[in-house]
Amino acid sequence: MACVKYGRGGCDLTRIFLEPPSPATQMVLDAARADERAADAYYYGFPHPESIVPALTDINVAQAFAARYDIRQPGN
């Protein structure tokens, strides 16, 4: 219950990285590997999970994250 009130973002990040990567998570990781600016946004999202968790869990937000750094996914 404390997770819901105080640490939801941290709990979400832990869950995301304990499970196999979703397509959204993989897209964000690929973007972070391809562009230093995306890597910085990813890294600096950890202290403020609410800024990065949506991109790691929602494919549309992940696509927008990648597009912000001109990262094109195969097939797009």
Image (spheres, rainbow, N blue to C red):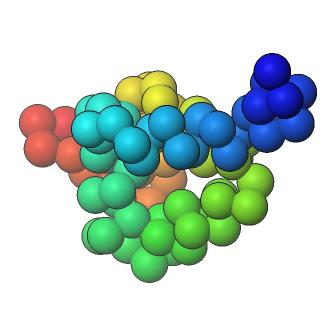
Question: What is the count of numbered marks?
Answer: 0
In terms of image quadrants, where is residue 21?
A: top left
Which residue ends up furthest to the left in the rendered image? 75
Q: Residue at x 31, y 70 (%)?
A: 33
Q: From the top left corner, tell me how far across and down residue 7 is, in percent.
A: 79, 39
Q: Residue at x 54, y 61 (%)?
A: 42
Q: Quadrant of the N terminus?
A: top right
Q: Residue at x 53, y 45 (%)?
A: 14
In terms of image quadrants, where is residue 6?
A: top right
In terms of image quadrants, where is residue 43?
A: bottom right
Q: From the top left corner, tell me how far across and down residue 64 is, in percent.
A: 48, 39
Which residue ends up furthest to the right in the rendered image? 5
Q: From the top left corner, tell me how far across and down residue 28 is, in percent.
A: 39, 50
| 16 horizontally vs 22: left or right | right
Q: Is residue 43 visible?
A: yes
| 8 horizontally vs 11: left or right | right
Q: Quadrant of the C terminus?
A: top left
| Rendered position, 13 above or below 70 | above
| Rendered position, 25 above or below 30 | above
Which residue ends up furthest to the front in the rendered image? 1
Q: From the top left corner, tell me how far across and down residue 36 is, in percent.
A: 44, 78
Q: Is residue 55 visible?
A: no
